[in-house]
Amino acid sequence: MELVYSFRNTKTSCVAENFNGFVQWLKDNNDNTLLFICNLMLPCLESIFMFRKGVRENNCVLIERARKIFRQIWYGRHHTKYMLIDSFGLCDRFLMPPEILNCLNKHESFSRSGRIDAHQGLDFILEEYNRNIKNHISGVANSIKWETVTKNYDTLEILTGNINSLLGRIEHTRQPRQIQEFKSERDIFRAELRKTKYLYPINERNIIGQELGNVLKSFDEI
């Protein structure tokens, strides 16, 4: 929206005030800040939001599209660890029997609360279990304590719940998972962009006024 605001305030009279005019304005603009935002930041942000929505709604199509966008960064910037993870994941999916791949696509994430928009990846779910397990371990955790607690985890959870009920305690860790509302943070960020005129061409400084380095000024040549 702030790009549209900048477009309306800086476009020439010969540029149409519609989507095609906005795209043409971006193409004709030589401002390095706008080029950086449109060619790098927007695709990255799009893939992040796409991935989060895909995980929360257990949508394998959105998750894979987000991964596809990020592949350009992993391979373009030679992030070897992420390249290996991505390559092994693609090979696994290619070699899987169709019925297993089908099952995997239907269960990219899981909802412990039952809400269709509050799914989580297995790594986050396991981390929640690990945190609860640590609550039942006294002192320094070792392999014996860890094994004992994990084997009796369900029983310990029931006992803990019964004790808390008898004592009248509120068990905060069992409250439904909250999804943070980012509208206020978004509005604050937009106000800061407009106040600093960060999106006004020609601008070769970052949001706090520091001059952009040569790498960012010519990032499209990397």
Image (cartoon, rainbow, N blue to C red):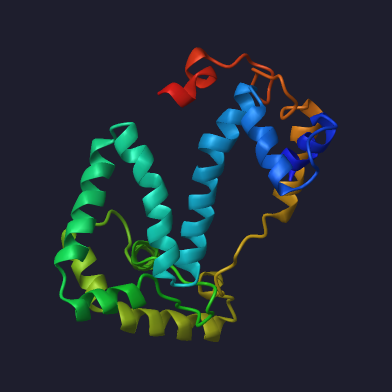
- What residue lies at 55% left-to-right and 74% top-to-bottom? 117
* Residue 128 percent coordinates (x, y): 40, 65
Task: Judge left or right: residue 110 versus residue 143.
Answer: right
* Residue 86 percent coordinates (x, y): 26, 50
Q: Quadrant of the C terminus?
A: top left
How many numbered dots are placed on residues in this image?
0
Position of residue 46 relative to residue 137, above or below, is above
- Which image quadrant is residue 176 in? bottom right
- Which image quadrant is residue 159 in? bottom left
* Residue 206 percent coordinates (x, y): 64, 23
- The residue nearer to you, when weighing 161 against 212, is 212
Task: Judge left or right: residue 50 versus residue 136.
Answer: right
- What residue lies at 63% left-to-right and 22% top-to-bottom? 30
- What residue lies at 43% left-to-right and 54% top-to-bottom? 66
- The residue nearer to you, when weighing 104 against 129, is 104
- What residue lies at 64% left-to-right and 16% top-to-bottom? 210
Look at the image and tell me whether residue 142 can be seen: no
- The residue nearer to you, when weighing 54 against 76, is 76
* Residue 90 percent coordinates (x, y): 23, 57
Position of residue 57 relative to residue 73, above or below, is below
Task: Judge left or right: residue 84 versus residue 29.
Answer: left
